[in-house]
Amino acid sequence: MPKVYITGLGFITSIGNDAAGVIESLRELRHGFELYPPFQKPEIPVKVAAPVRGFSMESTDAEDWTFPAPYRMRREILRGMAPHGVYAWCAMQQAVADAGLSEADISNRDTGLYAASGGSPHLMGHMLQRMHAQGVMKCSPLGIVASISGTLNFNLVAHFRIKGASCGFSSACASSSHALGFAYDELVLGRQKRMFVVGAEDGNVDAILPFAGMRALSLQTDPDLASRPFDSARDGFVGTGGAVVLVLETGDEVERRGAKVYCEVAGWGQASDGYNVAISHPEGHGLQAAIENALRATGTSAEEVDYVNAHATSTPIGDSSEAKALKAVFKTPASRPAISSTKALTGHGLSLAGAMESGFCALAIREGFMPGSAHITTLDPACEGLNIIRSTLPARPNVVLNNVSGFGGANVCLVFNKA
Amino acid sequence: MAYKELTMADAIQPGSGNDKPHPASPKAFAPEDEAPLREALKRCSPSTFEAAIQFRKTGNPEHLPAVVIGVIERFVEPDLRTKLKDADDDLRLIEDLGIDSLTMMEIVILVEDVLQMSINNDELRNLRTVGDVKTFIDCKVRGLSLPKPTKFLPIEQIAAIMPIQPPFLFINEASVSSSGANAKYKITGQEFFLQGHFKDNPVMPASIMLEALGQLGVLFLLDGPLAEPGRVVSPSTIFFTGCEGVRAHRICRPGDILTLSIKPKRMKMPLATFEGTIRVGQEKAVIAEEITLTFGYAEAVVAPVVNGSEHAGLKGAEAVAPIPLRAAINA
C-alpha cells in the first residue's frame, strides 16, 4: 500500500495568515478572539468571535472586498466566490508554493481536490432577499455557485484547473476530516497521486449567529475566557472562519519531486453515534468507535499515541462526551497521551475544523511541539485522569490523532505519524 | 420561460416622433431615485451615470449608447477596455471583449436596473456585437420591433448565396446587419490578374477593390433586411449602375488584409446606394461616396416542396431565386 505524506500547507486563520504566524500562536497560546464589531448590538447576546484579519468582505458585492497585499484576484475569479472561497484561494497559493508545485503538477489527471465548507449563508441570504424583493430574474447569475454548499470546490477546481478527482463533503464539523480521509483513500487506492484537501468557512455574522438558536455559542463577553474547552465554566463555542489547505502526496511522488515532508498520513477511521441530530452521544460511543477504527486501520496501539488534538469545542455536552471517549480508548494511565484542544485559541471553524487542526498536527510533528490547551482555570471533573496539557510541550510527538465530531453524530479520527 | 413585456413600451406615446418632450420613463424620475442609480453605476464612468440620469429624466434615447457602452465597459477586464474606446459597432462581445454568457447576464441585469426595463432571455442570444446591443436597447426603449441581429457568414455561406463565384469573389468572411455589412479579404498573391497588374510588381487594382465593395453590396441586398415577407431579392437581377466620389489612398499588395465596409444610403426599388470604405488595419485604402446597384425581387419559395410539384412555390412569371435563401441561411 502506498504511503501518504503531507507536503504543503496553507493557512488563513484567526491565529495567523501563514504557517509561521500560526506556529507562533500555537506555541505561545495566543488566541484570535475579539469583541467582534458586528456583534456589538444590544439585540445580539453573543459578543466574541475569532475573525480572520486583513480581509474585508462584509459587502455582498465581491468587488468591494479587500485583501492583504500579496493577494490579487481578478473580477472573473471573484464573481462566483464566497468570502471563504477567497480565504481558500489565498491558502491554496500558500500550499502550492510551500509544496513547490508547478502548474503541471497541479493540473493533471492524477491530482484532485476535496473540499468542505458550509456554503455561504451570507450570500445565500442576500440572493434570496433580492429574488423576493426585485424578482426572480434579478438574482445574480453567479449567486448560486457563490453561495450553495459546494461553492468551495466549484471555484477552486475551476480556477486551479484541477483535472483529477473533485468533490465536496458535507458532514458539518466533521466535513473537512472526511475530505482528508477520503483523499487519503484516493491515494492509497492508487486512483490519484496528489490531493488538495481544503476546509473553509465564512466565519461571519450569518455563518456564526444561527448557532445561537441552539444555545451552542458562548455568551462570554471576555475574549480571554470565551473559548475554554475542558474547563468547568465553559458555556459554548466561539465561531471562526478562514481556510486551510493540505497537500497530500504518495511516497512515489514525494520521491520523484524531492519534496519536503511534514508528516505521514497513516490512515483514519470513522463511526457514527446513531443517536441525535445535533447532540453528541453522552458517553461518546461514536467517537470512541471512530478512534478505535482509526487505530486498528493503522495498526497503532493506544500506548503509541503521543498527542491528541481533541475536537472539544467548549460546549458543555460535547467536551464531556469526548473526554469519556478518550478515557474509554486510553484505559491505563501509562497509555494516556497529551491532549489539547486548539479551539481554545482559534474558536470552532465548523467545516474548517478538521483541515485546520490536521494542519496544526502536521506543524506540531515537524516543528517538534505539542500546543497546550489554553484557558483552563478549573478542569472539568469529567476530564480527571486525562493528560490535558495546559501549556505547550517542547517535544516532538511521533504519533498524533485528530478528532472531529459533526451533526448527526458523525465522528472522524485521523492518524498522523512522524515521517 | 416567463416573458415580462417591456414596461417602457407601455408608456411610449405613439407618434411622438422627434418632438420634445421625449417619451417618458415609466415613472417620473424622482430626486430619491438618484442615490440608488448612483449606487448601481458606482463602478461605471461618471459620464455613464450622467447619461443614465439624463435618460431617466428626459427619456431621450440619444443617451442610450453612452449608458450601454458604459455598462459594458464596467464588466470588461481593464486591459481590454481600450478596445471599447474607439470601437466600431462590429466589436464582438465574446471574441473581442471576453464577455461570457454569465457576464452578459450581469450586463443585462444592470441595464435593466438602470433603464427600468426588462429583457427576455431569448432576445439576448442574438446580441453578438456592441452595435447589436445598442440597436437592441434603442428599439426596446422606443417600442420598435427588433431588427435582425448581425449575422456572420463564413466563405461557404457567402459562396452559396452570391451570384458571383471564385475566382472573382473578393470576400472571405462577412457580417451583415440592418445597418450595413462588413467583410474581410486577404490578398493572397495568387489572384490571376496580379500576374499582369503589374509586371513584377503585384498591386491590387483599384477597380477590383471597388468591385469588392460592390460585391458586399450584393451580399447586403441578398441577405440583409430588404426582404419582405414572400419576396426576396433575386440574385440574377443585381447589376452595377454607377459610383461617385471614388478615391484610392493606399497601395494594397499581397499579404494585406482588406477590411471592407458598406452602409446603405438610399434604398428604393430598383436602386440601392451605399457608401463604402476599405481599410488595411487603421489605414484608409479606398473610399467610395456612392456605389449604386440595381436590383429586383423574386417571389420567394413559401414552403419547402415536400412531394412532387417543383412549381409549388411559383406564383408569377419571374424566375425563382436559384437558392432557397432563407432556408440556407437560417438553418
Image (spheres, coloured by chain):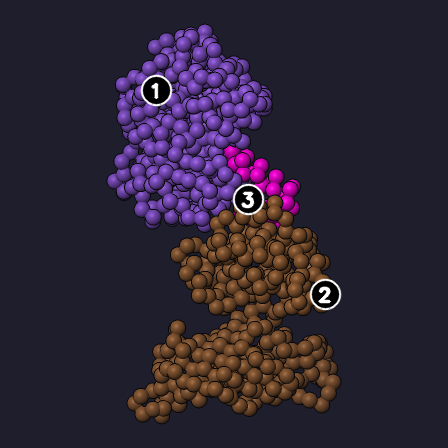
Chain colours: A purple, B brown
Examine the rendered structure and indicate whether residue A314 appears above or below residue B324: above
Residue that numbered label 1 is attached to: A29
Task: Give the mark nearer the N terminus: 3 vs 1.
Answer: 1
Label 2 marks a residue whose chain is B
Outermost residue toward the left in this view:
A258
Residue under numbered circle 2 = B14
B152 in the magenta segment = no
Q: Secondary structure at mark 3?
A: helix
Q: Chain of mark 3?
A: A
Please give the name of the residue rendered at 30% of the width and 90% of the height, measured from the top-left corner. Answer: B200
User: Which amino acid, by three-letter code, is at mark 1?
Assistant: Leu
Q: In this orientation, which residue lies closer to the viewer: A73 or A44?
A: A44
Q: Which residue is the site of mark 3?
A: A143
- For the question of whether residue A291 can be seen, the reply is no
Per the model, the C-alpha gap separating discs 3 and 1 is 39 Å
Tell me which amino acid carries mark 3.
Gly
Q: Residue B190 occupies which quadrant of the picture?
A: bottom left
Q: Nearer the viewer, residue B203 or B168?
A: B203
Residue beneath the point at 52% across and 65% down: B129
In the rendered structure, which amino acid carries the disc numbered 2? Answer: Pro
| Residue A379 image point, x, y percent | 42, 9
User: Which residue range is magenta in the image?
Assistant: A118-143
Quarter of the rendering occupied by the N terminus of chain A: top left
Most foreground residue, A419 or B228: B228
State which mark lies toward you, 3 or 2: 2
